[in-house]
Amino acid sequence: MKDGVVFSGTTACGKKIALTFDDGPHPRKTPEILDILDKYGIKATFFVVGTNAEYYPHLIKEEAERGHEIANHSYSHSRLSEFTEEQIKEEIERTDALIRKASGVTPTLFRPPEGKYSENIVKIATAMGKSTVIWTVDTLDWAKTPADVIAENIKNNVTYGSIILFHDFTSKQAHTTEALEIIIPYLQTQGYEFVTVSELIKGM
Ligand SMILES: [Zn+2]
């Protein structure tokens, strides 16, 4: 934790790590990701965008029902640094309301679009009862990175308490699901336990 911003858990987490999925839900990819997570019996955290939550509330409900954490990733996925304090609050509140309506849960985590935060954004999120969460490993799935390259990148960088950034959907050429099929069983054989971000940072 640095100035109220969470990048990862600590070594005290032991071999716990958190997979995070941004920008969803997506009607085709999110169900695929949920099935892979179930197949390996693991829990993850979905940083959802309000506009998508509005279109696909049933997927938010399903994420929650299948035991995953739902977190706030703003309403419009805009550059918040150009917004007023009121606008930033509205971005967070509107998305909270949509998530609450779909799943009954109010998120306690916030990730600003592109992970771009400022002291002001963190202060606003904190006042709204949310930890601002970034990541330690960017899988670069958004850059159409091949699945084996994503897997290598994670293998080389994962450590105790890592928060790993994936996306529900960024482009048709993304290899997110193929990479998950490689990396999850590998990390399980290495003794890593997959938990939600709230579980990972509990007590920090
Ligand atoms: Zn995003």
Image (cartoon, rainbow, N blue to C red):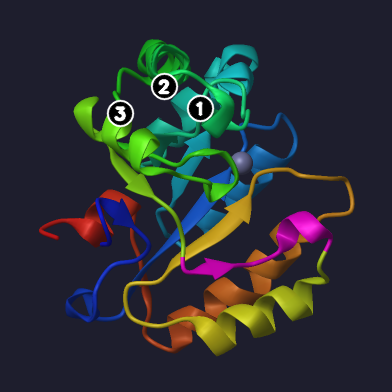
For the C terminus, the image quarter is: bottom left
* Circle 1: element type: loop
Q: Position of residue 16 (x, y in %)?
A: 31, 72
**Front disc: 2 or 3:** 3
Q: Which mark is residue 74?
A: 1
Residue drawn where x is 54% and y is 30% of the image:
80
Q: Distance between the Cα atoms at labels 1 and 2?
A: 5 Å
Q: Residues within 10 Å of mark 2 (few under 14, many from 20)?
A: many
Quadrant for ligand 1 reads top right
Circles 2 and 3: CB atoms closer than 8 Å: yes
Q: Position of residue 100 (x, y in %)?
A: 35, 16
Residue matched to label 2: 92
* Circle 2: element type: helix
Amino acid identity at mark 2: Ile
Residue matched to label 3: 124
Q: Distance between the Cα atoms at labels 1 and 3?
A: 13 Å
Read off the magenta span.
136-144
Image quadrant where residue 143 sits: bottom right
Residue drawn where x is 38% and y is 50% of the image:
133
Residue drawn where x is 81% and y is 55% of the image:
174
Going from N to C along the chain, the mark reached first, 1 or 2, is 1
* Circle 3: element type: helix
For the residue pair 120 and 102, the one nearer the viewer reads as 120
For the N terminus, the image quarter is: bottom left
**Relative height, residue 146 to residue 133 (above, below):** below
Q: Distance between the Cα atoms at labels 2 and 3?
A: 9 Å
Amino acid identity at mark 3: Ile
Circles 1 and 2: CB atoms closer than 8 Å: yes
Give the left or right position of residue 28, taking residue 111 as reference.
right
Q: Residues within 10 Å of mark 1 (few under 14, many from 20)?
A: many
